[in-house]
Image (cartoon, grey):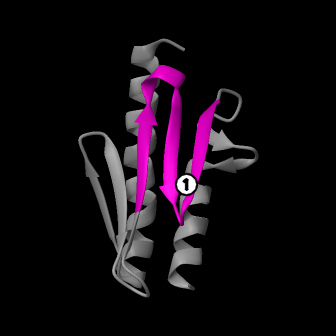
Amino acid sequence: MTEQEFRLQADQALEDLQRALLPMADQDGFEVELQNGVLQVVFEEPVATKFVVSPNAPVQQIWVSALSRSFKLGWSADRATFAVGEEALPTLVARLAREQLNA
């Protein structure tokens, strides 16, 4: 994948992730902000916390920093998504958000 192709795929993945998280954010009272190619998921309750989801072009990965952990997701061409193991980006971030909300 070229750097330009990566950037296009990463931008689309972050926009799709934002759309996927908005209903959960409205229901559970957290914010989802996409600015300058970085998605932030901001929680006030039960503890003030921020998740950061950002593309890393040199290694062609999307990095997720959440719950004191780091996840590095590579492009899965056969699944047409960024994933770590069997978990796709939207599934991973939604799972981490549920863990945060139940903390």
Q: Residue furthest top?
A: 2
Other residues around mark 1 within 10 Å, as few (<14) / some (14–19) / many (≥20): many
Q: How many marks?
A: 1
SS of the residue at dot 1? helix
- Residue 66 falls within the magenta-colored stretch: yes
Find residue 80 and report its horizontal and vertical position in percent: 61, 33
* Figure quadrant of residue 44: bottom left
The span picked out in magenta is: 51-75
Residue for point 51% across, 82% down = 101
Q: Is residue 74 left or right of residue 28?
A: right
Residue 6 lies, with reference to residue 32, above or below; the image says above
Find residue 20 and report its horizontal and vertical position in percent: 45, 59
Q: Residue furthest front?
A: 68
Amino acid type shown at disc 1: Pro
Residue for point 52% across, 76% down = 100
Q: Is residue 51 left or right of residue 42?
A: right
Q: Which residue is mark 1?
A: 90
Residue 76 lies, with reference to residue 88, above or below; the image says above
Find residue 24 and report its horizontal and vertical position in percent: 44, 74
* Figure quadrant of residue 77: top right
Find residue 90 and report its horizontal and vertical position in percent: 55, 54
Image quarter where the N terminus lies is: top right
**What secondary structure is the magenta-colored segment mainly?**
strand
Residue 33 lies, with reference to residue 37, above or below; the image says below
Residue for point 71% across, 29% down = 78
